[in-house]
Image (tube, rainbow, N blue to C red):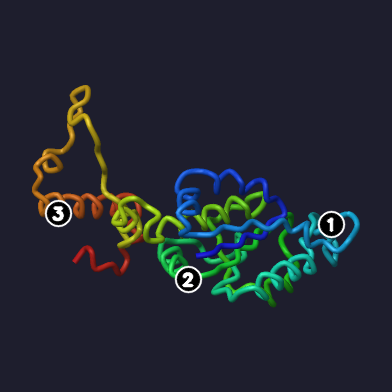
């Protein structure tokens, strides 16, 4: 899989992709992440990529030309399944979206900045718009890293235990059950006996019941229309 991220602030993204699971995935050759500095596509002596908004108002707007040049260059080299714009008014990211995107081959992620991008970028180039929540960040870089992480960890071979991602919260519209590790007893606080029993079926039943209980308490909206309760 290849992910191309277009940004006005590439240094923000260096940290996330140089660490942990994202770095492991890249080192294993399971994913290629390429970060593109939008200023390299600016066609002016000041490398400017923003301008005032027509009609007035506060804030600057990312202009269309450097974005066009960058996306057009990438698309001339390979086909892309999605060109995604990270924006607060996009569809809210969830596990189903990440699952679907983990199955594609190539995606472009455009990071917004300032007051956003020229609307013609959204009309002409963007195939999908995604938000990571109902709040506003200074730019789309952190949101792009969140999206990329949620996708990359699902690629077979990235995690040591490939079943791990399948038991995460939201995979079955349920929150994940409680987890415990050694020691079995600490300051009088004990691990539930069933988890120490070695009885696989009983453990699976306990985990399902705890997932259901936790979801009812914390995210009952996830159970709307879910067969898990039946």
Q: Nearer the viewer, mark 3 or mark 1?
A: 1
| Residue labelled with disc 3 | 205
Q: Earlier in the sequence, mark 3 or mark 2?
A: 2
Q: What residue occupies the far top of the structure in this picture?
A: 187
Image point (54%, 74%), residue name: 81
Q: State left or right for residue 91 relative to residue 111.
A: left
**Residue 124 image point, x, y percent:** 69, 77
Q: Is residue 42 above or below residue 213?
A: below
| Residue labelled with disc 2 | 104
**Residue 169 image point, x, y percent:** 34, 54
| Residue labelled with disc 1 | 48
Measure how far apart labels 1 and 2 are at the Cα level: 33 Å
Of residue 83 and residue 194, the one placed in the foreground of this image is 83
Secondary element type, mark 3: helix
Q: Nearer the viewer, mark 1 or mark 2?
A: 2
Measure how far apart labels 3 and 1 are at the Cα level: 59 Å
Secondary element type, mark 1: loop
Per the rendering, the mark at residue 193 is none
Q: Earlier in the sequence, mark 3 or mark 1?
A: 1
Q: Quadrant of the C terminus?
A: bottom left
Image quadrant assignment for residue 2? bottom right
């Amino acid at each position: 899989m290849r992910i191309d991220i277009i940004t006005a602030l590439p240094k923000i993204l260096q940290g996330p992709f140089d660490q942990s699971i994202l770095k492991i995935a890249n080192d294993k050759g399971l994913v290629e992440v390429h970060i593109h500095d939008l200023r390299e596509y600016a066609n002016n002596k000041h490398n400017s990529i923003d301008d005032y908004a027509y009609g007035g108002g506060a804030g600057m707007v990312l202009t269309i030309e450097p974005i066009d040049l960058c996306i057009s260059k990438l698309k001339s080299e390979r086909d892309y399944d999605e060109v995604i714009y990270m924006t607060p008014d996009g569809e809210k990211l969830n596990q189903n979206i990440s699952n679907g995107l983990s199955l594609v081959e190539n995606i472009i992620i455009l990071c917004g900045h300032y007051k956003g991008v020229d609307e013609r970028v959204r009309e002409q180039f963007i195939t999908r718009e995604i938000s990571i929540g109902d709040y506003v960040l200074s730019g789309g870089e952190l949101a792009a890293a969140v999206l990329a992480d949620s996708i990359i960890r699902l690629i077979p071979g990235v995690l040591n235990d490939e079943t791990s991602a399948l038991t995460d919260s939201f995979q079955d519209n349920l929150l994940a059950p409680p987890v415990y590790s050694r020691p079995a007893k600490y300051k009088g606080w004990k691990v539930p006996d069933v988890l120490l029993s070695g009885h696989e079926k009983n453990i699976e039943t306990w985990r399902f019941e705890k997932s259901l209980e936790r979801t009812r308490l914390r995210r009952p909206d996830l159970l709307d229309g879910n067969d898990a309760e039946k």
